Amino acid sequence: MLGLAHRLLQLIGKNLGKQKLSILIYHQVLPDFDPMRPDEATESVFRWHMALISRYMTPISLAEAMQGLRNNSLPQNAVCVTFDDGYINNLTVAQPILDEYQVPATVYIATAFSDGKNMFNDRIFDLIGDTQRQRFDLKAIGLGEVDVSDYASRLDLSYQIIRKTKYLHYALRVETIDKLYKDNAAQEYPRRMMTSEQIKTLSDKGVEIGAHTHDHPILRTLDAAEQSEQIAQSKSILEVILDKGVTQFAYPNGKLDDDYSLETVEIVKQCGFENAVSTLQGVSDSSTDVFQLQRFLPWDNHPLKFHTRLIHTLVKS
């Protein structure tokens, strides 16, 4: 019965999805569920995601998708899989599953973190998720001393801190979180991000590599010169690592006006990229600006709901 429902959705998708491109956003694929990262796919969930799109949709690389959009030759039910930031588990957990189901993917790398640093949001989740602590000194961000009692309160507090720090200049953001660690005498969590060697290994396994700025700033908060530096630096570093051109880009956070501007789009073009992805919700077609391709999060944890969500996104677009 479940198989019949999937086949019906497949047929609906073929009719609604002609010359439309769905692009999925992932960040991490975790070996096991992490209560501090409840929205990240686990290995088991990601496996059936890839099994489903391999069987009922047409997974293609983003490079193939761009050619299909240009030539009006996209296959039916076309879908691309993308990852942002550059986590080690993209290589160690996700890539073997991608390979098993022959699903192409693109991973966008924020290059500053390949030297061993963890991203600001992970540092916050790791600090507040430390179950050995029930009280945190957060005077550095104006929250005083705060007690937590369970994972729900830890998550809520983490999101409060992220909201207070995300739109700071990236250098001040690092400085602020450094101060939180110092004030709480906390130790850093081991490396979560891929090294240069691991990025090269992932590329050698057939995964497309794109740029995601150097320090993962909110580009809208920077002047044009700083934006250009952040965008061009990530491109040049990756081209040295990979010994080939890097032509794909992803805007950090990815919402037009909130996180990047039309000025940013022009800078991305000037830096020599051929396309860029946002987090504008929806699917793309031949009329979509290839420097603002739309994506969406595959957040459902049941196969039929996941498949229905894919079709629903096509209907809305």
Image: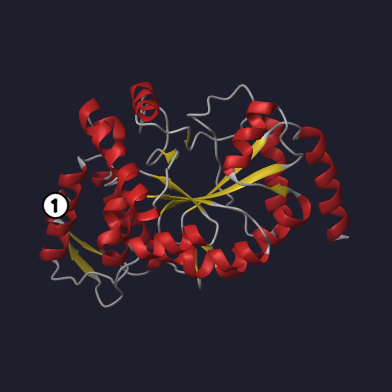
In the rendering, at what x and y percent does residue 35 appear?
A: 44, 67
In the rendering, at what x and y percent does residue 83 appear?
A: 49, 52
Q: Quadrant of residue 309?
A: top right
Q: Quadrant of the C terminus?
A: top right
**Residue identified by numbered label 1:** 175
In the figure, 234 relative to 19: above or below?
below
Disc 1 on helix, strand or loop? helix
Q: Can I make out residue 289 in this image? A: yes
Q: Quadrant of the N terminus?
A: bottom right
In the rendering, at what x and y percent does residue 152 appear?
A: 40, 63
Which residue extends farthest front?
243
Total marks placed = 1
Amino acid found under the numbered disc labelled 1 = Glu
**In the image, is 29 to the left or to the right of 48?**
left
Residue at point 31% right, 37% down?
231
Residue at point 11% right, 65% down?
182
Residue at point 70% right, 42% down?
78
In the figure, 103 relative to 259: above or below?
below
**In the image, is 269 to the left or to the right of 119?**
right
Q: Nearer the viewer, residue 254 or 232?
A: 232
Residue at point 27% right, 42% down?
233
Q: Can I make out residue 117 in this image? A: no
